[in-house]
């Protein structure tokens, strides 16, 4: 369940994270474009930092879904990775991560990758622990949380279907 206005709740803006990475040849494939796996690693890192900022502790990646590669990023361009918590649940949260390419000379940007990741909060013993509620401060926050809650229900339903076969 997504929480709103509860004690200890945190705004999405409190954990929003932005990272940048210059694309070097070691990040690229034979076509001079960033490796998909490298971009995924940066997205996971940014999402992980965002989730840890929200929880104030350790988190681990539980799942990645809806990851779409739309455009590429070339050597010499900058990857701009942004993450935001969409919704929190008892021990997990959905984090939306987007990656844009940026021409460092002109500042022009284009959308490259979008994804949603689920992170689980972990205590000092490595066990899942509770997550602070998310304070919904705008209509956009509420819409993101409602959509995330629906996606979570679908993920859990698929998991139960697979487990039952």
Image (cartoon, grey):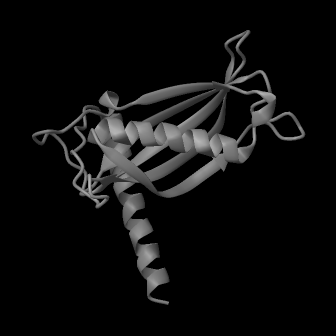
Q: Is residue 83 above or below residue 94?
A: above
Observer able to see residue 146: yes
Q: Position of residue 71 (x, y in %)?
A: 74, 37
The furthest residue to the left: 7
Where on the picture, by quarter, is residue 79?
top right
**Residue in the picture at 47% in, 51% down:** 117
Observer able to see residue 147: no
**Residue in the picture at 83% in, 41% down:** 29
Along the viewing direction, whichever of 133 and 75 lies nearer the viewer: 75
User: How many dots with numbers?
Assistant: 0
Q: Position of residue 87 (x, y in %)?
A: 33, 47
Along the viewing direction, whichever of 146 and 55 lies nearer the viewer: 55
Horizontally, is 37 left or right of 144 in the view?
Answer: right
Question: In which quadrant of the rendered image does the N terminus lie?
Answer: bottom left
Along the viewing direction, whichever of 102 and 145 lies nearer the viewer: 102
The furthest residue to the front: 125
Q: Is residue 80 above or below residue 89?
A: above
Horizontally, is 155 left or right of 44 in the view?
Answer: left
Along the viewing direction, whichever of 13 and 128 lies nearer the viewer: 128
The furthest residue to the top: 105
Q: Is residue 29 above or below residue 154?
A: above
**Residue in the picture at 74% in, 22% down:** 77
Q: Position of residue 114 (x, y in %)?
A: 58, 43
The furthest residue to the right: 30
Horizontally, is 100 left or right of 136 in the view?
Answer: right
**Residue in the picture at 44% in, 75% down:** 159
Q: Position of residue 17 (x, y in %)?
A: 44, 29
Where on the picture, by quarter, is residue 137?
top left
């Amino acid at each position: 369940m997504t929480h709103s206005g509860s004690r200890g709740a945190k705004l999405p803006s409190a954990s929003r994270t932005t990272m940048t990475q210059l694309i070097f040849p070691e990040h690229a494939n034979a076509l001079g474009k960033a490796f998909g796996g490298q971009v995924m690693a940066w997205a996971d890192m940014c999402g992980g930092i965002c989730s840890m900022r929200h929880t104030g502790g350790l988190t681990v990646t539980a799942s990645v879904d809806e990851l779409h590669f739309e455009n590429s990023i070339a050597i010499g361009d900058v990857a701009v990775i942004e993450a935001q918590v969409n919704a929190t649940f008892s021990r997990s949260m959905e984090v939306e991560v987007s990656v844009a390419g940026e021409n460092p000379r002109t500042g022009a940007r284009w959308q490259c990758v979008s994804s949603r990741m689920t992170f689980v909060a972990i205590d000092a013993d490595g066990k899942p622990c509770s997550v602070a509620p998310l304070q919904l401060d705008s209509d956009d926050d509420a819409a993101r949380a409602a959509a995330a809650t629906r996606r979570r229900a679908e993920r859990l339903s698929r998991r139960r279907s697979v487990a039952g076969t």
